[in-house]
Amino acid sequence: MTEYKEAVLGIKQQVSALCGDNTSLSYPIPGRMGELAVEWHFLYKQTMKPRRPRPFALVATELASGRLLLYRDCRLSDFMDTAAHPLNALLDYTLAGTLSPQQYRQRQEKLLELYGRVRQLAFLDQASLEDRELVGQYLREVEQASPAALTPYYRRMGADCYRWAGLTPAL
């Protein structure tokens, strides 16, 4: 778990160096770039306003090392259909329900713990049904812990992972 927390800190530092400190990193979604295991993240501006610009970039980091492999600015090459998700769209980042700061931290820790297990399982050739269900549980919990407006971004970014886990990423 500590190893993964250190990897996340490293990814955040790399992203801050590229985009500035006011950049937020999505929850990670495991994936592949060719044969290489990666973690996908989208980036969005951090602000206290409930309506904010949609994610502006996609990054891939190497699963084993946390090294940044890809930075894709959506203005140049978007991972979303810009007809349905225009680059200038403002999204509602309000979370469903009300959590105390302590409840929010507990949910974040639970997701981090779950992802620590998931990142070792995703895309294994010999994965059991239980392994795939655990990955599916993580994907569903990410959606529940995120603003609803970000669901299509997670599903597009992680379409291969959703399919691998037996979920259909309705895009």
Image: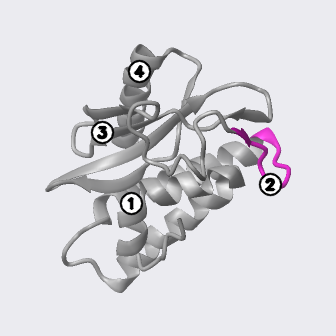
User: Of label 3 and label 1, which has the lower sequence position?
Assistant: 3
Name which residue type carries label 4.
Gln
| Measured Cα–Cα span from mark 4 to mark 2 | 29 Å
Q: Which mark is residue 117?
A: 1
Q: Residue furthest front?
A: 83
| Measured Cα–Cα span from mark 3 to mark 1 | 17 Å
| Measured Cα–Cα span from mark 1 to mark 4 | 23 Å
* Label 4 residue SS: helix
Q: Which residue is mark 4?
A: 13
Residue name at image x 50 percent, y 49 percent = 112
Secondary structure mainly formed by the magenta segment: loop
Q: How many discs mark residues in the rendered view?
A: 4
Residue name at image x 67 percent, y 43 percent = 105
Instruction: Specify whether residue 148 is painted magenta.
Output: no
User: Of label 2 and label 1, which has the lower sequence position?
Assistant: 2
What stretch of residues is rendered in magenta? 90-101
